Image: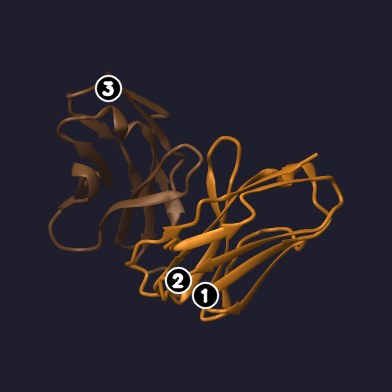
Chain colours: A orange, B brown
Amino acid sequence: DTAVSQTPKYLVTQMGNDKSIKCEQNLGHDTMYWYKQDSKKFLKIMFSYNNKELIINETVPNRFSPKSPDKAHLNLHINSLELGDSAVYFCASSFWTGTEEQFFGPGTRLTVL
Amino acid sequence: AQSVAQPEDQVNVAEGNPLTVKCTYSVSGNPYLFWYVQYPNRGLQFLLKYITGDNLVKGSYGFEAEFNKSQTSFHLKKPSALVSDSALYFCAVRDRSSGSARQLTFGSGTQLTVLP
């Protein structure tokens, strides 16, 4: 059974379009995250949700809007896609203690043309 | 503020030799420290962590890391490298005093290549 799953795995789209990435975890965790990994492999936190409540919102353009319908799901919607949004987006989950490791999904490679 | 540095972009080692991947951190309080590995086209996988207690922590696949508070380091080590250890390794830190944010800060990654 996949612990943290993301769909789609690949996303190719035109500038200006709106797209969504879905994430689900079956580990019973109460905290979920979105990370962006750029072409140089730098990994940066974008958002964090605990029990469906937004905890971390880094300096991300407001074109990015996360939504957490329940503790097991955290989706990422992106409006008006730009070339610079091209990256690999990872979802992760963990328990809220802060000492527990995060479990990562397989990533979604977004390419904006 | 919290930060982590991985001074080497690339580490090459011969199979069977010991390997070290370096990590230094900066936090205002005390750290929680983690190592993750990323294989090509995959998500990050947890290797090991230091929370408290023994400075030497052991993790998956024979890896270990030593927490050194005076040098603010948490280097990853393995006594005998395997070709299958070739991957991208990330060190991450969280300041214990970071309150409700509890976010991890990742290093820039070190590409480990084990040569047969």
The kind of residue on which mark 2 rests is: Asn
Name the element at disc 2: loop
> Residue A83 at what x, y percent from top left?
78, 42
Name the element at disc 3: strand
Residue lying at 43% horizontally and 49% vertically, measured from the top left = B44
The kind of residue on which mark 3 rests is: Val
> Residue A57 at what x, y percent from top left?
61, 66
- State which chain disc 3 sits on: B
Q: Which mark is residue B13?
A: 3
Q: Are marks 1 and 2 in contact (CB under 8 Å)?
A: yes
Q: Which mark is residue A26?
A: 2
Q: Which mark is residue B65?
A: none
Q: Are marks 1 and 3 in contact (CB under 8 Å)?
A: no
Residue lying at 52% horizontally and 75% vertically, measured from the top left = A72
Q: Quick check: A19 left or right of A6?
A: right
Query: In front here: A14 or B99?
Result: A14
Q: CA distance from mark 1 to mark 3?
A: 41 Å
Disc number lying in front (2 or 3): 2
- State which chain disc 2 sits on: A
In the displayed structure, B62 sits above or below A60; it is above
Q: Quadrant of residue B62?
A: top left
Q: CA distance from mark 2 to mark 3?
A: 38 Å
**Residues packed near mark 2 inside 10 Å, few (<14), some (14 to 19) or many (20 plus):** some
Mark 1 or mark 2: whose residue is earlier in sequence: 2
Q: Quadrant of residue B79?
A: top left
The kind of residue on which mark 1 rests is: Ala
Disc number lying in front (1 or 3): 1
Instruction: Give the residue pinned by disc 1.
Output: A72
**Residues packed near mark 1 inside 10 Å, few (<14), some (14 to 19) or many (20 plus):** many
In the displayed structure, A61 sits above or below B73; it is below
